[in-house]
Amino acid sequence: MHLFFALLVGPGLAAASSILFQGGTIIAFDDQTESLQVIRGGSVLVTDDRIASVSGPEDRISVGNDTEVVGITGKILAPGQINTHLHTWQTVFKTLGSNTSLVDYFGRYGEFAAAGLLSADDVYISQLAGVLESVNGGVTKILDHAHHTWSNETSEAGLQASVDSGVRVYWGYTFHNITATTPAFLVQDQIANFEDLASNPAFKGSPTEICIAYDGFGPTPNVAEVQAIMGLAEEFNIPVIQTHSVEGPWPLQNTPEALERLNLLNSSIPFVLSHGSFLSARGHQLLRTHNHYISITPESEFHYGHTQPTAHLASDQATLGVDTHFTFSADMLSQTRLWLQTVRATLYKAVLDRWQIHMHSPMSVNQAFLMSTRHGGLALRRNDLGIIAPGAKADLAVTVDGKWLKKGGKLLAEGYYEGRIQNRLIQTSPVLYEVGESWINGLSVGEVLTVDSKRGEGNGYGGLFLAVNGTQ
Ligand SMILES: *[C@@H]1O[C@H](CO)[C@@H](O)[C@H](O)[C@H]1NC(C)=O
Ligand SMILES: *[C@@H]1O[C@H](CO)[C@@H](O)[C@H](O)[C@H]1NC(C)=O
Ligand SMILES: *[C@@H]1O[C@H](CO)[C@@H](O)[C@H](O)[C@H]1NC(C)=O
Ligand SMILES: *[C@@H]1O[C@H](CO)[C@@H](O)[C@H](O)[C@H]1NC(C)=O
Ligand SMILES: *[C@@H]1O[C@H](CO)[C@@H](O)[C@H](O)[C@H]1NC(C)=O
């Protein structure tokens, strides 16, 4: 099988930088069968930014003497996870969001509430901290719905932090009308800002790529605005467009049907629709026909209550993501396990509800693992991302483009363990602890029961702990 071939490093490649990961358990991908292949005692040779070979214990690997050889006996080498939905700049709100509802979210932490309250420096450090937390948890690629675009300066700061991180960030410039700032920063202003950033050579040449995020496709789009944004996407050859799609009683109705009405589905640019909580059967068919993906973010959907009633039925067009890492954590393995067990529980319940017992497990670990790795690559229409196979990008949970980001279990980012980044963040976070509820205007609101987890008096709900002085 062609998975096992060793590249002989010839004279032509002498100048290349190489790393050989030797003698560990490799979670490889076999292109022929399109499935995972676990190789014990295997090795992976990386040359520059690509995987040159994946070998079994019997294969002889010949490498140049400038190759860095890393013994991985007793370890697992996995592809970096792909987080297909994150608002990376929101790290600054850590510790404030443990029991927030979606209404709190929009009132306190969303782009429209935070606009103008965080400086460009705040955004930079918060974005950088979010990317590094992701890397620490094994993520090498982030689809960032970057809605910190409320001034030229804050937009640039978040992009700069992504570039500086060395991670493959698909940084989605968000077009939205921000009126909380003086002056307002509207879509028309953002188009000029976007053009500046997207044509600036300073932001090229790193793994980070500029993309687009936009929530105005449905249900009542401004067609001229949509056309202007799609024009930018084509002009600047944008790799992916991100949009929020929830439906049900929630707003954010950028559904496959809405994209179809705008005649956008049959485009060469892939869309990633975040959540897809109330995706319809027809919406799923549209995604299949035109090959677009949803990004299921299990923990945030349960946390905020979008929930996820049907997305398991669309697993073939679905990836996984994190969304608001400030309310929990940015690691994708937790999301993958949470989603796996949620799907199992959902499908088991359907059998138990008939007073029957099931005979097999409805979803495998392989399926879940591929959803958080390979499917992220497929959502970007890239066959070389999210897998360990010859020719794939060398994004290996500890490297991006074959360059180390984490080594010996430690992040290599300067100053990370001295608390430089964390201390800077803590100075910023309490600014935003103000509740605004205007977002719910016009929506139908219902009561939810509060859990009582304490014997006797009180319910044990407790308070919030602010980062600065422990007060509420
Ligand atoms: C590799 O090692 C050999 C023998 O030690 C040495 O002659 C040669 O210069 C080395 N090549 C490189 C590229 O370092
Ligand atoms: C933001 O950048 C755009 C594009 O360069 C420019 O036209 C605009 O004047 C800038 N806005 C401010 C407030 O500097
Ligand atoms: C931005 O504002 C314009 C003018 O009011 C409006 O037509 C457009 O739909 C708005 N865009 C978004 C994404 O809200
Ligand atoms: C998409 O567009 C191409 C070219 O315009 C056309 O040939 C193709 O039939 C379309 N596909 C679908 C599924 O509409
Ligand atoms: C979270 O808990 C704190 C402390 O009890 C409370 O002030 C806050 O309103 C709670 N938030 C929500 C959304 O319940």
Image (cartoon, grey):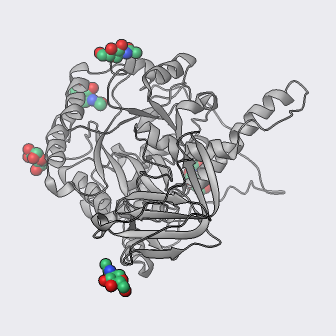
Give the camera-side residue of 319 and 364. Answer: 364
Residue 245: percent from the left, percent from the top? 46, 30
Q: Quadrant of residue 356?
A: top right
Count of numbered circles on the image: 0
Q: Is residue 359 above or below residue 320?
A: above
**Left or right: 165 in relation to 156:** right
Instruction: In the rendered view, tell whether residue 393 sits above or below residue 44.
Output: above
Residue depicted at 29% across the width and 49% down the height: 209
Residue 279, image x, y percentages: 54, 25
In the image, 24 versus 177, the foreground residue is 24
* Image side of residue 307 versus residue 406, left or right: right
Whether residue 303 is visible here, answered yes or no, is: no
| Residue positioned 36% across, 52% down in the render | 169
Q: Nearer the viewer, residue 234 or 307?
A: 234
Q: Is residue 309 left or right of residue 387?
A: right
Question: Which residue is pictured at 42% across the width and 78% down the height?
Answer: 419
Q: Is residue 114 shown above or below 130? A: above
Please state the quadrant of the image where ligand 3 appears: top left
Task: Establish if 24 lies above or below 53.
Answer: below
Q: Where in the figure is residue 350, as x and y percent of width and height? A: 79, 27
Q: Is residue 152 visible?
A: yes
User: What x and y, as percent, mark residue 290?
Assistant: 42, 22
